[in-house]
Each structure stands twice: as C-alpha cells, then as structure tokens.
Amino acid sequence: MADFVPSNIIQTPDFGQLAQGYGQLGGVQSQVGQQVGQAMQGYGQQLQGLGGQVAQAGQQDAQALMGIGGMQQQLRQQQLDAQRAGLLQAQQAPLQQYQQVMP
C-alpha cells in the first residue's frame, strides 16, 4: 500500500516571504543601530559637559586655595611685623630710659 499524503500538509517554502522577513529584520537592526548610536552620542555629550564642569571646579579650587594661602601669608606677616616692633621697642628701651634721666 502506498503512503498517501494530502497535498495541503506538504508546503513548499516561500522564498519571497523568507526574503521579505530577512529584509524586515535588517530594517529593525538598522533602526536599533541608529538608536544605539544616538544614545552613545548623547552619552558622549554628557561626559563632555561633565568634563568641563570638573575642570571648572578644579580652577575654582585652585583659586580658593590661592586666596587662603594669601590670607595666611598676610596674617603671618602681621605677626612677624608685630614681633619685630616689640623687639625694636625692647632694644631701644634702655636708650629711652637713659635719655629720660639725663638733664
């Protein structure tokens, strides 16, 4: 007895439909690639902006430290000036006492 297979069970592949499916898949991959590219571009711009902010903050820190250093130097100079004035006064005290007792 011969095997009988109804013709509606066996289907031949439709290469046109398969090619269309691959074409659609390629289109989807292209769109995904574009979206990834745009996302990476946006990320790069954010990093660039962040780098600028870091550089600016570093400049501000350096300026603040220079200002603090200047104030420290000024304060130390005032202390040294006061110390020198006290030493000069102590050095000249005997002469002033002598001049006071002289007629």
Image: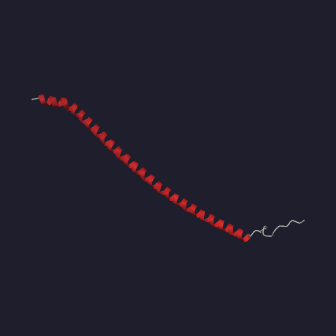
Looking at the image, which residue is at 41% across and 51% down? 59
Q: Position of residue 44 (x, y in %)?
A: 52, 58
Quarter of the rendering containing residue 16: bottom right
Residue extending furthest toward the left = 103
Quarter of the picture holding the C terminus: top left
The one nearer the camera, 81 or 88, is 81
Looking at the image, which residue is at 44% across and 54% down? 53
Looking at the image, which residue is at 60% across and 65% down? 31
Residue extending furthest toward the bottom = 16
Q: Position of residue 67 (x, y in %)?
A: 35, 47
Residue extending furthest toward the right = 1
Looking at the image, which residue is at 40% across and 48% down? 61
Q: Is residue 65 depicted above or below 9 in this figure?
A: above
Quarter of the picture holding the N terminus: bottom right
Judge left or right: residue 102 versus residue 21. Answer: left
Q: Is residue 42 depicted above or below 78 in this figure?
A: below
Q: Is residue 63 depicted above or below 38 in this figure?
A: above
The one nearer the camera, 5 or 83, is 5
- Number of residue marks: 0
The one nearer the camera, 100 or 71, is 71
The one nearer the camera, 59 or 90, is 59
Q: Is residue 100 depicted above or below 14 in this figure?
A: above
Quarter of the rendering containing residue 38: bottom right
Judge left or right: residue 43 versus residue 87. Answer: right
Q: Position of residue 40 (x, y in %)?
A: 55, 59
> What kind of colouring is applied to the model shown?
secondary structure
